[in-house]
């Protein structure tokens, strides 16, 4: 049976329309997925770059603060071996109630090397000054101040509020050192003090 030219034209037009709609549907179905792939792929490198920049900035800050400090060296302990006696009359005998300094045998004084001991004083001063004028020192505000000074979140530990005081620890270990800081942010009663951490492994203040 032969179809008229008009019928043939109608069938051809319908087939073309079906093919066009199918192609459009395939394109629309693939478009969101195709567009999301580059965005997801770009997000990960951006986060890695930001983290690397923060770590580099933190390391540079530590080096800048410690640049005026002596090189790392083991802490000096109490003298060992027999004590040499002084010649008679060469030294005055102190009174019985006189204060005689004793070499430290415990605490940060005995466990931190010279470089860390020096750097800790500089860290304590700059952090205390930044927190003294902080009103209502909540953990979020304290973290913002520490971040602004260059201390990254990975080195801030146990940031907790107790009443009007926010306490925290800072892990400042580098180059085999053991330096950490214990902070108590409370306005003008802010206290920052040095502490000691293990040389390697997870952060945990000793004692």
Image (cartoon, grey):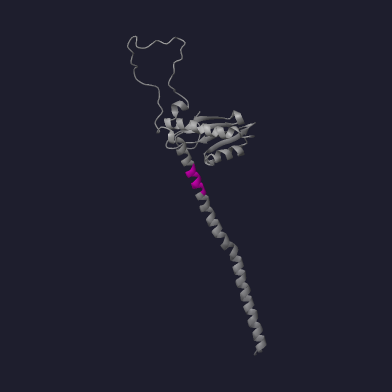
**How many numbered marks have been drawn onto this rendered protein structure?**
0
The answer to which quarter of the image holds residue 79 is top left
Q: Against 23, is 115 above or below?
A: above
Taking depth in this image into account, of 207 and 103 the one nearest to the observer is: 103
The location of residue 70, given as percent across then percent down, is: 41, 32
Q: Which residues are magenta?
A: 50-57
Q: Against 36, is 165 above or below?
A: above
Q: Is residue 74 left or right of residue 38?
A: left
Q: Is the magenta region chiefly helix, strand or loop?
A: helix
The answer to which quarter of the image holds residue 103 is top left
Residue at position x 46%, y 41% in the image: 60
Q: Is residue 82 left or right of residue 119?
A: left
Q: Against 82, is 33 above or below?
A: below
Residue at position x 55%, y 38% in the image: 146
Asked if residue 66 lies in the magenta stretch, the reply is no
Residue at position x 60%, y 72% in the image: 23
Taking depth in this image into account, of 137 and 67 the one nearest to the observer is: 67
């Amino acid at each position: 049976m032969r179809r008229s030219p008009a019928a043939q034209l109608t069938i051809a037009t319908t087939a073309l329309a079906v093919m066009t709609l199918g192609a459009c549907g395939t394109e629309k179905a693939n478009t969101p997925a195709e567009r999301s792939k580059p965005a997801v792929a770009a997000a990960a490198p951006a986060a890695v770059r930001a983290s690397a920049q923060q770590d580099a900035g933190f390391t540079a800050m530590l080096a800048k603060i410690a640049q005026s400090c002596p090189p790392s060296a083991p802490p000096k302990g109490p003298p060992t071996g027999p004590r040499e006696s002084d010649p008679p009359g060469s030294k005055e005998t102190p009174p019985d109630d006189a204060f005689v300094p004793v070499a430290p045998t415990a605490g940060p004084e005995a466990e931190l090397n010279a470089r860390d001991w020096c750097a800790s004083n500089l860290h304590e001063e700059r952090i205390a000054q930044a927190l003294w004028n902080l009103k209502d020192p909540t953990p979020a505000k304290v973290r913002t101040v520490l971040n602004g000074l260059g201390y990254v979140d990975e080195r801030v530990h146990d940031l907790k509020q107790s009443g009007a005081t926010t306490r925290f620890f800072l892990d400042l270990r580098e180059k085999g050192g053991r330096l950490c800081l214990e902070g108590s942010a409370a306005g003008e009663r802010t206290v920052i003090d040095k502490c000691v951490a293990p040389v390697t492994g997870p952060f945990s203040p000793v004692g």
